[in-house]
Image: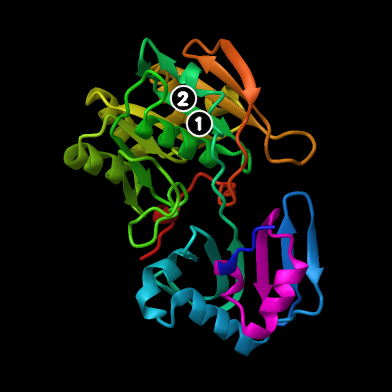
Amino acid sequence: MVLLREIVNLFPPVMQKALEEAVDWNTVHEIRVRVGQPLEVVYYQDYTWLEHLVPTETEKNHILNQVSQFSLYRLEDELREGFITVNGGHRIGLAGKVNTSNGAVQAIRYISSFNIRIAREKRGAAQGLMGRLVHKGNYCNTLIIGAPQTGKTTLLRDITCHISTGWKGVAAKKVAVIDERSEIGASIHGVPQLDLGRRTDIMDACPKSEGMMMMIRSMSPDVLVVDEIGHQRDVDAIQEAINAGVTLYCTVHGNNLKELRKRPSIKQLLDQHVFKRFVLLQKSGSGNPAGRAMILDERENIMDVTAGGNAHEVDRSPVITSRHHMGRV
């Protein structure tokens, strides 16, 4: 069993020993902390309550101090967004009383809940797919499609690592990652905590449309990697990137191409045949997040069906609206 010391150390000493013994650290997915309620431990297929561990206000403040390193002011932007990334790439979601100004969120001031989402790198998630994403020695513009928890972000991260490091006969490429929600690299102070390869540059916590243009102007990438496209401004930036000769790897929430065609912004890209490969991810029926991946060509013909990547612990948002477009200040 691999004990996640960086997680255990967030808790008061009196709770640490109990957590070490009670949690299956090989399969834990989330630990949910609510003041006055037993700790909830969430696994991929089940959850359990630790009835003997009920955090008080004092214990909550201890966790908050550990998460923020005793400086909430330093994390003002993160508090506004509702989560904090800690060492190891783990993300701590926050809930409580929100302060607003003119209808926009300024910060979460009185925190009452934490959602500690365990991050693990799933190496090799893209290994069985890479050969289909290359044509005549060149990487193909690719759209990864899947519902929440099907492993889109995990797959995208592993593809990024392969492209940036070099895959078989294809030389390593310069890769630019626009990580709007800090999910691909799980960056802290702009430095990714997860492996994205040696030739990868990352723009963390930056809106996708602006980030794509910034990276093209400043970092001369061969490949752009973007998670969860959907807005018209994302589409406009993608078209600019294509015109600049940059290859694109993107993800989008959806179940199939027919469903995506009902969304005007995505339909525009599909009608223009921007993407030469589509990867459709599905969960397995057993509740295991590792499902299958179907690869389609630009004419939407099936090229292959293979095992999909494991869902990453932060690949869970059920909506395409990203955190930078929610009327926050």
Mark drawn on residue 305 = none
Q: Which residues are magenta?
A: 6-35
The reply, left or right, for residue 201 in relation to residue 280 is left
x and y, in percent, of residue 95 in the image: 57, 71
Residue 51 visible, this orientation: yes
Q: Residue at x 39, y 55 (%)?
A: 324
Instruction: Name the secondary structure under disc 1.
Output: loop
In the image, residue 288 lies in the stretch drawn in magenta:
no
Residue 329 position (above or below residue 246): below
In the displayed image of the protein, which residue is found farthest to the front? 1
The reply, left or right, for residue 15 in relation to residue 69 is right
Measure how far apart labels 2 and 1 are at the Cα level.
6 Å
Q: Which residue is mark 1?
A: 263
Instruction: Name the secondary structure under disc 2.
Output: helix
Q: Which residue is mark 2?
A: 267
Q: Is mark 2 in CB contact (under 8 Å) with mark 1?
A: yes
Mark 1 residue type:
Arg
Q: Residue at x 76, y 76 (%)?
A: 38
Q: Which residue occupies the foreground of this view, 257 or 190?
A: 190
Q: Residue at x 82, y 76 (%)?
A: 51
x and y, in percent, of residue 238 in the image: 33, 31
How crowded pointer 1 is (Cα within 10 Å; few <14, some 14-19, many 20+) is rated as few
Mark 2 residue type:
Lys
